[in-house]
Amino acid sequence: MDTSAWARFLLLNVVILPFRPRQSAEAYHTVWDDHGSPLLRHSRDFVKELALTLGERFAVRVAMRYGNPSIAEAIAEFRRLGIDRILAFPLFPQYASSTSGTALEEVFRVAGSQWNVPAVSVVPPFFDDPGMLRAFAEVGTPVLGDLRPDHVLFSFHGLPERQVRKSDDSGRHCLASQTCCSAMVSENRNCYRAQCYRTAEGIAAALGLPQGGFTVSFQSRLGRTPWVRPYTDETVRALARGGTRRLAVFCPAFVADCLETLEEIGVRAREDFVANGGEELRLVPSLNAHPAWIEAAARLVRAAAWSETAVSVP
């Protein structure tokens, strides 16, 4: 978090805790299945297939930043196995301090607390990785072929605008104009929003979508502080009111289906779309353990690996 301790206390105890646990429980109930959490199930399937693809040189484990199995548990298991080299793989295509950054901070904290500190390396952000982009296109092609959408929406998880501005070392580029994300330049090379646009454009190109045939938006905002725009909920309503009847939605900030994809888009956004005049909104599944994604992830690991170990951090 990039706010003061007092602000974090107020956010947690005045805004989040009085309301979010009940709301989250109700939302999770709509997407839970016989296997429990979709995120954990898909993450375990991904790790299993990735381990098979990488072979015996790598020990691969799931490690959650918030939840179980935890990062501490994974690193402790590596220690028991006699592993002293760790490759951390944050499973967020685009970098943000609040996602990849906090996960890596925890990896370094736990690893650094050991008496014998292991060597730690990192798989970098893969927002424009050709294999990942092709994998999303492979997952989406049959959905688009069946739905024949009027429009495609790429909905990414949102961030407060202040966090995007902080990624710009110059302080003069990010969110300073309407076209700040139109191209990757030195000033926005670490900008989450700019990376999201590159991901959407790459998937659109792989799908052969025309210019004007897709839109980028940002979901899951919280509180009254400005978050990056355009907002997904407003965009979905505007598309429906503007005549879009069949809408396909990708969520490429996630490589596994979770609450933010299955419930927020697959349930709430779909209901909102129909209520505003649309006919059908269909969520394109995430990459999960799709074979094309497994191959792409294995290439990313091999390219970054100087170690004999990989730990995934959803």
Image: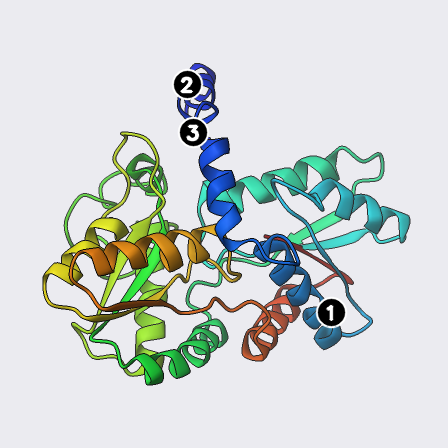
Percent coordinates x, y for residue 87 in the rendering: 69, 56
In the image, is 33 to the left or to the right of 181? right
From mark 3 to mark 2, how far is it between C-alphas? 18 Å
From mark 1 to mark 2, how far is it between C-alphas? 43 Å
Single out the mark in the foreground, 1 or 3.
1
Local SS, label 3 = loop
Q: Residues within 10 Å of mark 2 (few under 14, many from 20)?
A: few
Residue tagged 3: 2
Residue tagged 1: 51
Single out the mark in the foreground, 3 or 2.
2
Residue at the farthest left position: 242
| Residue at position x 25%, y 54% in the image | 272
Residue tagged 2: 14
| Residue at position x 25%, y 50% in the image | 233
Local SS, label 2 = helix
Percent coordinates x, y for residue 70 in the rendering: 70, 43
Between residue 55 and residue 29, name the one nearer to us: 29
Local SS, label 1 = helix
Q: Type of residue at label 3? A: Asp
- Give the quadrant of residue 38: bottom right
| Residue at position x 82%, y 71% in the image | 56
From mark 1 to mark 3, how far is it between C-alphas? 35 Å
